Image: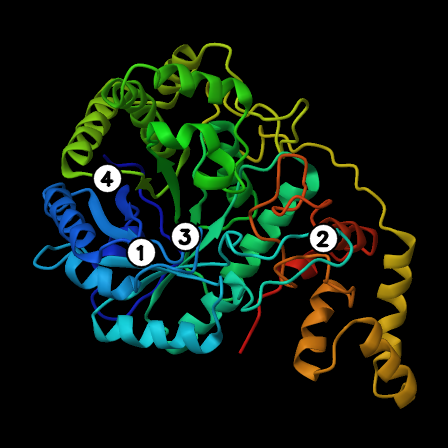
């Protein structure tokens, strides 16, 4: 499976087969495995993972195994203990995810050091989904924070690259957003992650191919040549009933598609798998034809299923050799099914998923006109006044009062608020300042269900001040 080569923005010293394949613009398959929960036995999971690694190693397109970190809960086994036995005596390298959920800079640096000692040089840096034990959010204005906090994926990428500049560092982006603010906030934070040290991107798992094409067009519009892997997920029957919260946080699945999945799994698990495989094959080939560098295959739990998946991808590769053939097959397979979870969804471009429009062309691909929502008056006033009140020229009493109003008593924490134009970020349960996580709902509501995402206010303020470019600034140090 190949595509027209392009030079990616990557440079690594030493030998790293995954990074080299990514740089060479080969279409890669990465197999994702979940590190088991702490209350589950580790040895059986390692044995099953190793059996899958042995099968995966037989396919030259499989470039790595990706291991999750603290998925849904911080209470999981040590990811490096799992990695040690997973790919033993196989050719496959590991891509280690580092989650910010309950993390600190010390934990990140310690994981990076241990991983390096084991020969692991590929990482994916994520803020992490909402912890299952996060205190209930009862008020949208001042939410309850997580006791051990969430370290932003931007900071994690910066720290990992600082530890060793030869590391191959990936960052997450969620293209499955359906309001103007949500979508562009994801794109701007994606650029901030690249500016802060990430070498490549991994898109969240979802089924809306129009959104996956939109991400590629935006990258080409901005002349960003970084490789992007798309996560493609195989579901089990017990996951269908709760797709958003338990399986794909931040990816909004429309009821019609959920109903389709429920019909497919009414007989038994084997029949459900048989129904999913053609869709998965179509999606993988679609990602290749849309310009992705590869896919991360998630939700595969046994060597037998992995074997069927790899064979299905080969069948799809032969059946759909070009974009128009694939698009016709994708539309035929799903009929009138729409993957948008809300009416009148926002798309950054016209003519997505239309025949003859596989890749972005500046002469023919038209951007959508945007109409920004004005910021709140209190936000405009705060953004204008707080930099003055906090400056060294301001009287100490005013500086102290400002720190009190912003709930900041230390200089470092206060300095980070400049990325929010000094707006108090207490409405964000994760206390992020460098941009949103990917967990918002279909209409831009916070992942924790209380009110709109805090960063909608930041987006409106930045647009009104003609300072949207500041949302893309890298974080140095």
* Mark 1 surroundings within 10 Å by alpha-carbon count, few (fewer than 14), some (14 through 19), many (20 or more): few
If the image is split into quadrants, where does the N terminus sit? top left
Which colouring convention does the figure follow?
rainbow
**Res 26 seen here:** no
Residue, disc 2: 454
First of labels 2, 1 by sequence position:
1
Q: CA distance from mark 2 to mark 4?
A: 37 Å
Residue 152, percent across and down?
A: 54, 63
Residue, disc 4: 301
First of labels 4, 1 by sequence position:
1
Residue located farthest toward the left when viewing the structure as drawn: 89
Residue, disc 3: 71
First of labels 3, 1 by sequence position:
1
First of labels 4, 3 by sequence position:
3
Q: Nearer the viewer, residue 232 or 234?
A: 234
First of labels 2, 3 by sequence position:
3
Q: Nearer the viewer, mark 4 or mark 1?
A: 1
Q: CA distance from mark 2 to mark 3?
A: 23 Å
In the image, taking residue 466 as reference, residue 306 lies left or right, namely: left
Q: CA distance from mark 2 to mark 1?
A: 35 Å
Q: How many marks?
A: 4
Q: Tag 4, which secondary structure?
A: loop
Tell me if residue 466 comes above or below residue 361 in the rendering.
below
Tell me if residue 91 comes above or below residue 330 in the rendering.
below
Q: Tag 2, which secondary structure?
A: loop
Residue, disc 1: 39
């Amino acid at each position: 499976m190949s595509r027209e080569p392009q030079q990616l923005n990557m440079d690594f010293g030493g030998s790293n087969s995954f990074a080299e394949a990514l740089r060479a613009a080969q279409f890669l398959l990465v197999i994702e495995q979940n590190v088991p929960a702490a209350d589950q036995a580790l040895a059986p999971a390692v044995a099953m993972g190793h059996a899958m690694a042995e099968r995966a190693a037989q396919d030259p397109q499989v470039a790595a195994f990706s291991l999750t970190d603290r998925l849904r809960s911080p209470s999981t086994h040590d990811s490096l203990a799992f990695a040690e036995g997973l790919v033993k005596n196989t050719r496959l390298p590991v891509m280690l995810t580092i989650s910010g959920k309950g993390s600190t800079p010390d934990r990140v640096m310690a994981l990076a050091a241990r991983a390096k000692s084991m020969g692991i040089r590929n990482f994916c840096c994520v803020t992490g989904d909402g912890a299952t034990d996060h205190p209930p959010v009862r008020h949208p204005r001042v939410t309850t924070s997580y006791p051990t906090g969430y370290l932003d994926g931007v900071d994690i990428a910066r720290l990992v690259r600082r530890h060793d500049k030869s590391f191959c560092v990936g960052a997450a982006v969620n293209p499955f957003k359906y309001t103007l603010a949500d979508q562009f906030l994801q794109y701007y934070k994606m650029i901030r992650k690249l500016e802060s040290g990430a070498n490549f991107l991994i898109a969240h798992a979802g089924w809306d191919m129009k959104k996956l094409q939109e991400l590629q067009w935006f990258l080409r519009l901005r002349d960003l040549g970084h490789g992007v892997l798309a996560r493609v997920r195989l579901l089990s029957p017990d996951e269908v009933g709760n797709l958003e919260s338990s399986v794909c946080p931040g990816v909004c699945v429309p009821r019609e598609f959920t109903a389709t999945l429920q019909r497919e799994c009414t007989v038994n698990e084997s029949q459900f798998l048989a129904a999913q495989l053609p869709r998965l094959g179509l999606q993988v080939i679609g990602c290749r034809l849309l310009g992705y560098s590869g896919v991360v295959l998630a939700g595969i739990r046994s060597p037998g299923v992995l074997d069927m998946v790899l064979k299905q991808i080969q069948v799809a590769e032969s059946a759909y050799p070009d974009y128009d053939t694939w698009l016709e097959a994708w539309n035929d397979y799903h009929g009138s099914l729409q993957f948008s979870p809300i009416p009148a969804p926002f798309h950054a471009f016209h003519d997505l998923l239309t025949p003859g429009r596989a890749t972005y062309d500046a002469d023919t691909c038209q951007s959508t006109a945007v109409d920004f929502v004005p910021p709140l008056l209190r936000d405009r006033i705060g953004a204008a006044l707080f930099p003055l009140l906090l400056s060294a020229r301001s009287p100490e009493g005013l500086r102290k009062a400002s720190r009190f109003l912003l709930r900041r008593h230390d200089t470092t924490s206060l300095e980070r608020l400049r990325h929010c134009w000094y707006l108090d970020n207490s409405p964000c349960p994760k206390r992020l300042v460098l941009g949103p996580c990917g967990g918002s709902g279909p209409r831009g509501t916070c992942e924790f269900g209380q009110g709109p995402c805090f960063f909608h206010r930041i987006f409106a303020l930045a647009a009104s001040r003609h300072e949207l470019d500041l949302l893309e600034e890298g974080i140095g140090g």
